[in-house]
Image: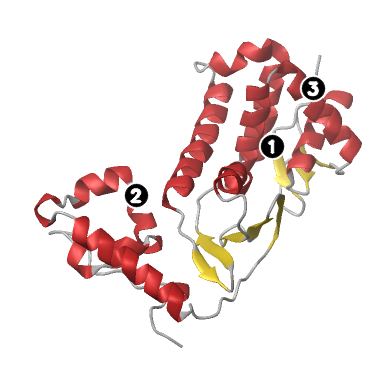
Amino acid sequence: MLDRTNLAYACDGSFWGMLCCVFDSYTRREIPQEILEWGEPSFYPVHQVETVEEHAQRVWRSLNKISGQIRRWAEDIYFSCVPQRAMVLYRFIRKAYQYGAKVTSMLGDEDVMAAYRLSRSVGNETHFMEEFLRFSEYNGILVAVIHPKTIVLPRIAHHFSDRFPEETFLIHDQPHEMALFYHPYQMEIYHLSELELPPVTSQEAWIQSLWKGYYTATGIQGRLNPKCRMTHMPKRFWKQVLELEQPCLKGKGETPSLKTPAHLSFTDE
């Protein structure tokens, strides 16, 4: 039985740190009213939660024993990057301990529904990135720059490594300052705040122009439907998709041609 409730927890904001909040809650017999990152103000007395890997691992292993789906939802809640994700994660884990594997089907519960929505948002963003990510070649390395709403690199890593097992590629997540680097059969995700890319080579520009020409030639002007396109590909992805930069493919009612990103310049050096 957990007792004290008139306090807040503060952690370092990492996934391991959030799991340590769960550990401290049960060992200290407390239910925090909110979980903040270090330095954020609170109206409640604040307990500073230290990130101890052993404590986080104990919570993580306990979730694995319940079900793989609960473990994935817990990861997705963190990947969602919403401001209150730590509290959503804490409440969902408490419900998982209480009800076991069936908790993921209890969508009538407010805490479970909140976890489900965040997991679904990460799943949707992962699907979009797998569909609409575009690579350009720089000195034999495939490079893509993405702007997802959630953290997706851990979710898309195996998709692209399985698809291009013999290639070397880099996927840079600009908003979250992360990068996935893959070299045949080795993969790593690390922090990367900025990425400076050289102009594309004449060969890469030629390949890009061939693809745009093919897309233009196979398109049917009379069947262009911008509104339908937006239901399958949100407009925020259009500037990252090479073929949609063709002015001739703009249908009636669409916005003017989008500015070409610097790393997709077609000007020869």
Q: Nearer the viewer, residue 4 or 86?
A: 86
Quarter containing the N terminus: top right
- In this view, 137 is above or below 114: below
Image position, residue 43 (x, y; %): 71, 43
Query: From mark 3 to mark 1, how far is it between C-alphas?
Result: 23 Å
Q: Which residue is found at the position 75% from the left and 39% from the top?
A: 18
- Horizontal side, residue 122 vs residue 230: left or right: right
Which of the two discs, 2 and 3, labels the residue nearer the N terminus?
3
Mark sitting on residue 62? 3
Disc on the earlier residue, 1 or 2: 1
Q: Which residue is drawn at 55% across and 80% down?
A: 198
Residue 224 position, x and y percent, is: 15, 52
Q: Mark 1 points at which residue?
A: 34
**Label 2 sits on residue:** 234
Which mark is nearer the camera, 3 or 1? 3
* Residue 256 place in picture, x, y as percent: 23, 69
At label 2, the amino acid type is Pro
Amino acid tagged 1: Glu
Which callout, 3 or 1, points at the residue further toward the start of the chain?
1
**Nearer mark to the viewer, of 1 and 2:** 2
Residue at 12%, 49% in the rendered image = 223
Report the residue at 28% width, 43% height from top: 231
Q: Give the alpha-carbon distance from disc 1 to disc 2, as whole Å.
A: 34 Å
Figure colour scheme? secondary structure
Secondary structure of the residue carrying tag 2 is: loop
Q: How crowded is mark 1: few (under 14 residues within 10 Å), some or many (20 or more)?
A: many
Q: Reply above or below: 4 against 225.
A: above
Left or right relative to 161: residue 135:
left
Count of numbered tags: 3
The local crowd at label 2, few if under 14, some if 14 to 19, many if 20 or more residues have their Cα within 10 Å, is few
Q: What amino acid type is highlighted by mark number 3? A: Ser
